[in-house]
Amino acid sequence: MEFRILGPVGLWLENKEIPLNGTKQRTMLAALLLAGGRVLPDHRLGEALWGRNPPGTYQAQIYTYASRLRQHLEDHAEIVRKGSGYLLRIVSGRFDYSEFDALSRAGHAALRRRRYGHAADLLRAALELWRGPTLTDVTEHLGETERPSIEEAYMETLESRISADLALARHVQITSELVGLVRAYPLRERLRAQLMLALYATDRQADAFAVFHEGRRQLEDELGVDPGPALRHTYQAILTGSVDEFGPEAFTGRPEPAPAGGDSPWRGGALLTALGTRQP
């Protein structure tokens, strides 16, 4: 059985979706999955389902939702009443967000060890688990609470996958992707710095500077701040023609000593730590 929240929330068995009745059932399933096997108290479930003012019968309704979900789980998972809450224990099944997290952590670890090809493969596999906007078909209350951190984890994984691709000199292949991402997320400085480096590596230095100045204006106009280290250091490296001195570590943070057989084609030495990896 597959338990999914990275897109429409639901249960899948043998490539067929198990129909769940309504938003409340999907919300309870998602909330229990995100609790990671820990007990979720009734009052927390009540907030996820109804917000800060649940109905007086909310515990009875939660009991009903739990009973209905159990009918779909068979032997693949169990919902257990424990104390004043519930927990979901997966016995035989796959939870897409748990798989995403494991692949993402392994990919970041490979990135720090300069195993760029392996890192790119792991991080790409993590991203491929997403099937659209996460936590769809749940209540607004749960979505507002949980969606931001999950989407941030996605963005950090995406940025690190791009870092691995840059370190593998895949500049041409990812430039158009980065253009679209910077347009969609204009205030994410790491993406903008990555686009600048990809443009520079494909002999588009003027375009790289234009990307920097556009970002500086947007940061000032919308947030009233100056560019951070990622943009400033990248701009300076391109301005002085010293990008090649930084090597692939420019995109991965301060790594451990490189193991024998590292797989990066980039030449270089010192680090541009401003474009560091996500730490576990």
Image (cartoon, rainbow, N blue to C red):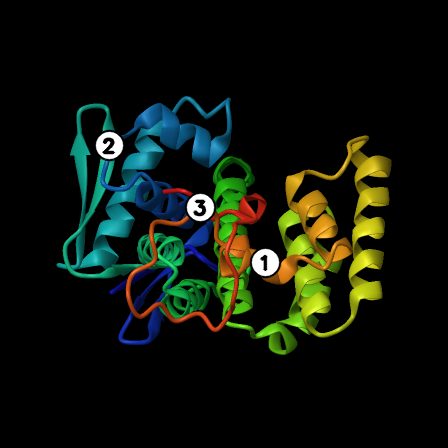
In the image, which is nearer the foreground, mark 3 or mark 2? 3
Asked whether residue 188 appears in the rendered view, the answer is no
Residue type beneath disc 3:
Arg
Give percent across and percent down for residue 52: 50, 23
Residue type beneath disc 1:
Glu
Per the image, label 3 sits on a secondary structure element best described as loop
- Identify the mark at residue 8; answer none if there is no mark: none
In the image, which is nearer the foreground, mark 3 or mark 1? 1
In the image, which is nearer the foreground, mark 2 or mark 1? 1
Residue, disc 1: 245
Residue at 25 percent of width and 29 percent of height: 85
Taking depth in this image into account, of 16 and 174 the one nearest to the observer is: 174
- Residue 63 is drawn in which quadrant? top left
- Residue 169 is drawn in which quadrant? bottom right
Horizontally, residue 6 falls left or right of residue 180, namely left
Residue, disc 3: 254
Placement of the N terminus among the 4 image quadrants: bottom left
Residue at 22 percent of width and 55 percent of height: 71
Residue, disc 2: 39
Q: Are marks 3 and 1 in contact (CB under 8 Å)?
A: no
Residue at 21 percent of width and 61 percent of height: 93
Placement of the C terminus among the 4 image quadrants: top left
Which mark is first along the chain, 1 or 2? Answer: 2
